[in-house]
Image (tube, helix red, strand yellow):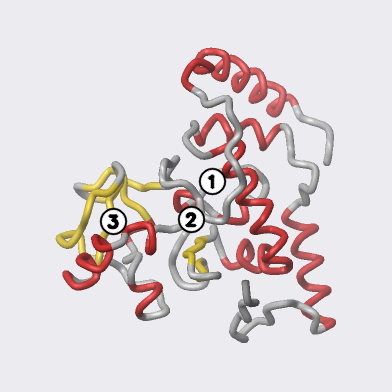
Amino acid sequence: MSQPTRRHVLAAALFAAALIATAGALPTAARAQTYESPNEGPWRTVSDGADDKLMLLGHDPVAYFTQNQAVKGEPSIKVEHLGVTYRFASEAHKAEFLKSPAKYMPQFGGFCANGINYGVPWGAGGGPDTWRIYRGKLYVFGGQSSRDHFEMDTERNLALAHRYWNEEIAGRNALLQRVKRLVFRVPHYKTDSALQQEWEAKRAAGTLPVMPGAAQVVPAR
């Protein structure tokens, strides 16, 4: 990791000040590791029309499971759950979600799973090529390259992501956590360019666990 720039130092100072100001509101006990993210946020939302806390960029969470594709939900067919809004392509999908919300909700509050792998809750998509159902759970990514990099070692990266989510992120302020981990990187941090070089080398050698165009093989539990 390169030396912090002046911008990084300033960000760290701002983070420290904000952390002190909000310390009383932050949980101090670490959560036990689990492979299902707690449903307490933070949430990755956007504002669209009448919905100021819209999940999955407006994609239907049920469609990922039933249609194996990203499908935009209708603004008129929606549900507010845990303070955020989900849209659906049909009333049937809305009813299915209401039966078991946890089954269809994205992991890590809808943030990019590869970002959470580095302790950084940042953007995500949920559109074509930016999501994956793995072991029955929905994970979304900030882009195709983010998913590619994550899937170079899905099991390891998934374990790391759940660890950082449970110990540092769940129930806390996403912005403060983001600044913290952009300045104080996790021990296994790699730059995007380094990850891309690694991915391209594995692709050329035919050793990627998920080759482009091929279906992902999910190992047994």
Find the distance from the CA under tag 1 to the CA under tag 2: 13 Å
Badge 1: how crowded within 10 Å, few (<14), some, or many (20+)?
many
| 154 sits left or right of 204 in the view | left
Badge 3: how crowded within 10 Å, few (<14), some, or many (20+)?
many
Q: Answer whether labels 2 and 3 touch (C-beta < 8 Å).
A: no
In this rendering, the label closer to the viewer, 3 or 1: 3
The residue nearer to you, when weighing 209 against 183, is 209
Q: In the rendered image, which residue does mark 2 sit on? A: 107
Q: Which residue is drawn at 73% across and 68% down?
A: 152
Q: Residue at x 54, y 18 (%)?
A: 18
Badge 2: how crowded within 10 Å, few (<14), some, or many (20+)?
many
Relative to 194, does residue 148 appear above or below in the rendering? below
**Residue 80: image x %, image y %?**
23, 49
Find the distance from the CA under tag 2 to the CA under tag 3: 14 Å
Find the distance from the CA under tag 3 to the CA under tag 1: 19 Å
Dot 2 or dot 3: first in sequence order is 3
Looking at the rendered image, the quarter that the C terminus falls into is: bottom right
In this rendering, the label closer to the viewer, 2 or 3: 2
Q: Is mark 1 on a helix, strand or loop?
A: loop
Using the rendered view, name the quadrant where residue 5 is placed: top right
Using the rendered view, name the quadrant where residue 209 is placed: bottom right
| 106 sits left or right of 146 in the view | left
Dot 1 or dot 2: first in sequence order is 2
Q: Answer whether labels 1 and 2 touch (C-beta < 8 Å).
A: no
Tell me which amino acid carries mark 2: Gln
Q: In the rendered image, which residue does mark 3 sit on? A: 86
Dot 3 or dot 1: first in sequence order is 3
